[in-house]
Image: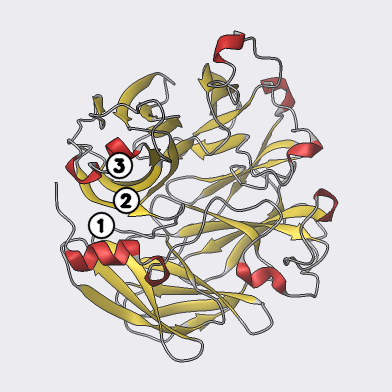
Amino acid sequence: MAKLSPKASARFRATPRLAMTTLLLCPLLTWAGSHKKAAPPEPPHVRATLPPAVTIPIEPLGFSAPAPFYLGTRNCLVSLDFLDESRLLLTFRVPGLIHRDHRDAAENGNERKVRALVIHIPDGTVQAEAVWTLHDRRRYLWMLDNGQFLLRDGDELKLGDASLQLKPFLRFPGPVLWVEMDPNRKYVVTGSSEPPTSASRAGDVASAGPAAAALVSDDPKPGAEESDLILRILRRDSGKVLLVSHVQSAVHLAINADGFLETLRGNGRSWVINLAHFEGGSTPLGSLDSFCSPELDFVSAREFLATTCESDGDPRVLAMTTGGRRLWENGGGGSLVWPALVTSADGLRIARETLVVSHGVNAFAPLGTDDIKGQDVQVIDAATGKVVLRAQASPIFDIGGNVAITPSGRRVAIIMAEGLQIFDLPPAPPLPSESGAPSKH
């Protein structure tokens, strides 16, 4: 396992220097740019700006809209992903009572059943189905490549495929709270809550193979002190730990195969973006202006998005390359309340969804259930910033999970009132070379 250099370790401990964003947000608060008092633009008057190529009724599949009281709780209730160009993986919470013994009520208080379906496009045939038992309400599924996916449950990560059979992958010393990956799905970033006896040895974690291995050597002891949060970067093919760090809170870390993005504050509203390499050292990628700490997200190995905000809180999205070129910049369309990104495997298409709310959100005007009016979805060409599809997802899932893009970016699926709506799109333009002027939309 690679050891953290003192400089790299300091970067992980110094949260303000990283492109990190707290993930465990209070349901009543949102991104810093949403304090603008003016209400954001209304969602499109039509349900979608393009007609769907295929509509698959969703209720016959056993799906039902969640109860209104879930809105704003940030529970993960659904996931929608393409396994390939013609097969969808749909999973959703199965409502109903769960019978459990009173003796394990404390341990399994958040236990729930999730139904998984593999659906063939365009005929809507169900090719495989399963019911999984999960033990918390956080996000649980991430797509890999070649029709594989990663399933998180408690302290375990499992591998699955189109057969919906699950195989053990990794087990951690405590519950895994969040998972992220680089655009090529070669690395996995995990954050886990671990007892101090294990967390103190986080740098000595044994490597684990893809079949199954435990990352733990110490068990929690009765009366142990408060758990630590441990962030790890692992190689997906082997489970080997590349980097590890103690963190103060759940964080968002934008990584590619070379390293992770960090922001350094300059004078006034100026920020410098660096790519900090796993092997040490860093490369400056450019600078930008923002009145809040920019949020960074890789959409491909070469391109990342920087979400910034103006003095009045109006957000803007800037697309840049790791070569330092600015590709495009556009406005966020009003307050970005709980934005979520979905990208195609080739990184050429991006789906960005945000909540449409009745007023600006801040500490004095929190977000209530009645204030959420819709969920806006925009599908964007990553090379140009052009919006090629805009639609309203329904029912609203405030944490996302209701939009999917095929690996080629040629199809988009959205859960809408009528069912699963499948939209066919033209080929996405390729990412331009590093030379040339940026575009604006």
User: Is label 3 in a helix, a strand or a loop?
Assistant: helix
**Would you place residue 12 above or below residue 370 in this image?**
below
Residue on which disc 1 sits: 257
Viewed as shown, does residue 282 lie left or right of 345?
left
Query: Quarter-wise, where is residue 102 in the image?
Result: top right
User: Is label 2 in a helix, a strand or a loop?
Assistant: loop
- Going from N to C along the chain, the mark reached first, 2 or 3, is 2
Between disc 1 and disc 3, the foreground one is: 3
User: Foreground residue, 194 or 307?
Assistant: 194
Circles 2 and 3: CB atoms closer than 8 Å: no
**Would you place residue 5 above or below residue 163 in this image?**
below
User: Foreground residue, 203 or 68?
Assistant: 203
- Please rate how many residues cluster around mark 1, counting C-alpha atoms within 10 Å: few if below 14, some from 14 to 19, many from 20: some
> In x, y percent, where is residue 178?
45, 44
Between disc 2 and disc 3, the foreground one is: 3
Q: Is residue 186 visible?
A: no
Residue type at mark 2 is Asn
Residue on which disc 2 sits: 184
- Going from N to C along the chain, the mark reached first, 1 or 3, is 3
Q: CA distance from mark 1 to mark 3?
A: 26 Å
**Would you place residue 439 above or below residue 362 in this image?**
below
Residue type at mark 3 is Ala
Viewed as shown, does residue 245 lie left or right of 132?
left
Which residue corresponds to the image point at 44% horizontal and 35% vertical from the top-left? 83
Residue on which disc 3 sits: 199
> In x, y percent, where is residue 390?
67, 58
- Going from N to C along the chain, the mark reached first, 2 or 1, is 2
